[in-house]
Image (tube, helix red, strand yellow):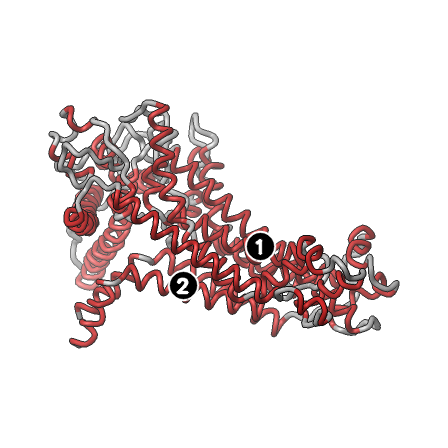
């Protein structure tokens, strides 16, 4: 039992890394299943379309899923087009703020598709099929050879060998694919490292305060869920009992619609203030009524976790 | 015990994702079973009809099951013959189509999953299209092959044609490739459409993000409590009735909601931004049993809890 407890604790402490590793393993497994069971290169003029559809369609779907799963997207979008007046409603300000928030969300959503593309390129089946039908590769490989070269090239994914003259001069499609795969992985890792360094460099918040902030966000989210469930249970009990017993309902204090709107806004950082979340800000500025609540702040990338802690 | 609780909580938090993955796995398994056990391409002029039936009938069955399993369907239709005003309330005729559209979108998930898995596998499409006698299509498929391709395409799926092996193999691969590209198109289009619809619905929502989260929690809790109180009252009432029957006594009064109260509580709910109500029962209890308000604004999102009737 203690062993299990220790294991669970370890998993919880390192859940981000474990999460990413599991996602990568899952991607590799699914790619392997696809390329061995489902993928059959037609070995004719449709090679390029077929290969690229297997390479890019899952990446696109993972990209869309990345958007749907990120809570910040929904915080940004919910209620934006409705006719009701909101706080922070200057249109050009909203547009710039929109873009500033959309870029980090897009960057986060790109992780899964890039993992798929890297794993698929390392597996080499999809690229081999697609490249054998591409006119660029054909012009590279077949520039001095006859018309048979094109037909032979189209059949290479089905096991046919190219003439020794051509295959000795150029890197094989299999090798090309794996090289490109490693390049993708290396460049993505470099970009991730640089962007994390830059965002931390530009952070207006110190390291220890950031660590405390992350823990606060998580705890606030957990307590929000517990309190929401408690509140909902009490409200539901009151309503159902009154319905069945045909009595008048006792007054039940619950946050108004405006209060909910105020705490649902995206968090912005203002160095003059010391608020760790919108709920903290709302509670400290007299339920959002004092002037301090409406002051403009900045959307810091390093503080993206404040809104993402609330998963939908 | 603590560890198990943590593990359970982890899975309960991701139950939507786990639910959809399970449905996808079930669809894949079902499709494999069908194509290995039940599907035998006739390799005659009936290919097209046979393949299409296998492709679309399970989708239709899944759609109907989806309608059955959504409790909103029954809330919408129960009692509609007796009182048509229920479906077409005064001043809000589009309400029925809006709700029916939502229910349909929810029910379309499983059939679309089936279609994409079946197309990615390729067996049904291969059989169907090899029997299509459309001259333009035959020209496109057989354009660089021998003359026999035009007459014997429908036998290619069972390897019974007199074409050389390399040609029939290439034809099969071409048909499978077409099927798989079509399958990817279906998946990508569905994903894009569902993202756009959810974005639009969210954008136009008059309810803020966190309040929507609370609303979902409230709906779940109210449903659980309603079940519990149904059990409680049903036990009390049946105990009283049977006791009085066997002991030949007068029954004590037990207060239950009136017929009209049940009718009003069974209406589909939509959030009104001027009020602070989270469900039909909540509104009923706070405002008394007046007629249904004309304001029909936000409905809880499309991926609203699927309940068994």
Which circle, 2 or 1, is nearer the viewer?
2
Other residues around mark 1 within 10 Å, as few (<14) / some (14–19) / many (≥20): many
- The residue where tag 1 is placed is B184
Question: Which residue position holds label 2?
Answer: A24
Where residue B78 sits, quadrant-wise, is top left
The residue that appears at 52% across and 59% down in the rendered structure is A180
- Where is residue B126 shown, x and y percent of the image? 69, 63
Choose top left, top right, bottom left or bottom right for residue B9.
bottom left
**Place of residue A277 in the rendered image (x, y in percent of width and height, measured from the top left):** 19, 40
Q: Residue at x 65, y 56 (%)?
A: A48
Mark pair 2, 1: CA separation = 22 Å
Q: Residue at x 31, y 49 (%)?
A: A196
Which element type, helix, strand or loop, lies under badge 2? helix
- Secondary structure category for the residue under label 1: helix
For the image, the number of numbered tags is 2
Task: Answer left or right for B142 relative to B52.
Answer: right
- In the image, residue B125 lies at what x, y percent? 67, 60
In which quadrant of the rendered image does the N terminus of chain A lie? bottom left
Residue drawn at 13 percent across, 25 percent down: A290
Discs 2 and 1 lie in a common subunit: no
Chain under numbered label 2: A
Within 10 angstroms of label 2, few (less than 14), some, or many (20 or more) residues? some
Q: Are marks 2 and 1 in contact (CB under 8 Å)?
A: no
Residue B165 horizontal side relative to residue A308, left or right: right
Which residue of the protein is positioned furthest toward the right in this rendering?
Answer: B147
Chain under label 1? B
């Amino acid at each position: 039992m203690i062993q299990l407890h220790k294991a669970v604790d370890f998993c919880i402490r390192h859940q981000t890394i474990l999460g990413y590793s599991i996602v990568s393993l899952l991607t590799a497994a699914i790619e392997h299943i696809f390329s061995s069971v489902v993928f059959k290169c037609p070995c004719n003029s449709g090679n390029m379309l077929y290969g690229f559809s297997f390479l890019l369609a899952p990446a696109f779907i993972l990209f869309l899923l990345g958007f749907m799963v990120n809570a910040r997207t929904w915080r940004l979008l919910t209620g934006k087009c409705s006719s009701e007046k909101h706080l922070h409603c200057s249109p050009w300000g909203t547009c710039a703020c929109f873009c500033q928030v959309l870029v980090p969300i897009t960057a986060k959503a790109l992780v899964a598709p890039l993992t798929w593309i890297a794993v698929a390129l390392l597996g080499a089946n999809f690229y081999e099929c697609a490249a054998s039908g591409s006119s660029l590769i054909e012009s590279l490989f077949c520039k001095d050879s006859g018309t048979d070269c094109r037909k032979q090239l189209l059949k290479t994914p089905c096991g046919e060998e190219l003439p020794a003259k051509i295959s000795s001069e150029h890197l094989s499609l299999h090798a090309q694919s794996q090289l490109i795969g490693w390049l993708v992985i290396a460049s993505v890792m470099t970009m991730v490292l640089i962007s994390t360094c830059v965002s931390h460099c530009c952070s207006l918040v110190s390291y220890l305060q950031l660590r405390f902030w992350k823990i606060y966000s998580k705890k606030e989210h957990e307590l929000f869920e517990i309190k929401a469930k408690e509140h909902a249970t009490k409200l539901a009990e009151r309503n159902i009992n009154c319905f069945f017993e045909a009595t008048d309902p006792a007054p039940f204090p619950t946050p108004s619609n405006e209060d909910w709107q105020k705490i649902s806004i995206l968090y912005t950082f203002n160095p003059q203030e010391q608020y760790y979340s919108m709920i903290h800000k709302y509670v400290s500025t007299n339920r959002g009524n004092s002037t301090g609540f409406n002051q403009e702040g900045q959307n810091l990338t390093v503080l993206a976790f404040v809104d993402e802690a609330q998963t939908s | 015990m603590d560890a198990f609780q943590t593990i359970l909580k982890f899975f309960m938090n991701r139950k939507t994702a786990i639910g959809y993955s399970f449905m996808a796995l079930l669809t894949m398994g079902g499709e494999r079973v069908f194509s290995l056990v039940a599907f035998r391409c006739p390799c005659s002029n009936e290919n097209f009809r046979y393949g299409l039936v296998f492709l679309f009938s399970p989708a239709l069955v899944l759609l109907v099951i989806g309608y059955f399993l959504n409790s909103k369907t029954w809330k919408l239709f129960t009692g509609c013959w007796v009182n048509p005003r229920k479906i077409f309330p005064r001043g809000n005729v589009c309400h029925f189509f809006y709700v029916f559209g939502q229910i349909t979108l929810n029910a379309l998930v499983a059939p679309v999953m089936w279609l994409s898995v079946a197309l990615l596998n390729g067996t049904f499409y291969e059989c169907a299209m090899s029997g299509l006698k459309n001259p333009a299509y035959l020209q496109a498929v057989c354009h660089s092959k021998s003359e026999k391709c035009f007459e014997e395409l429908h036998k290619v799926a069972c390897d019974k044609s007199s074409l050389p092996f390399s040609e029939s193999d290439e034809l099969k691969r071409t048909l499978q490739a077409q099927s798989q590209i079509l399958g990817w198109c279906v998946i990508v289009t569905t994903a894009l459409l569902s993202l756009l619809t959810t974005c639009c619905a969210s954008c136009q929502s008059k309810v803020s993000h966190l309040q929507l989260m609370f609303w979902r929690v409230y709906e779940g809790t109210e449903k659980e409590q309603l079940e519990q109180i149904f059990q409680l009252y049903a036990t009390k009432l049946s105990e009283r009735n049977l006791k009085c029957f066997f002991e030949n006594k007068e029954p004590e009064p037990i207060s239950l909601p009136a017929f009209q109260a049940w009718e009003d509580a069974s209406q589909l709910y939509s959030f009104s931004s001027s009020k602070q109500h989270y469900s039909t029962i909540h509104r009923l209890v706070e405002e008394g049993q007046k007629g249904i308000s004309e304001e029909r604004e936000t409905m809880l999102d499309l991926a609203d809890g699927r309940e068994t009737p």
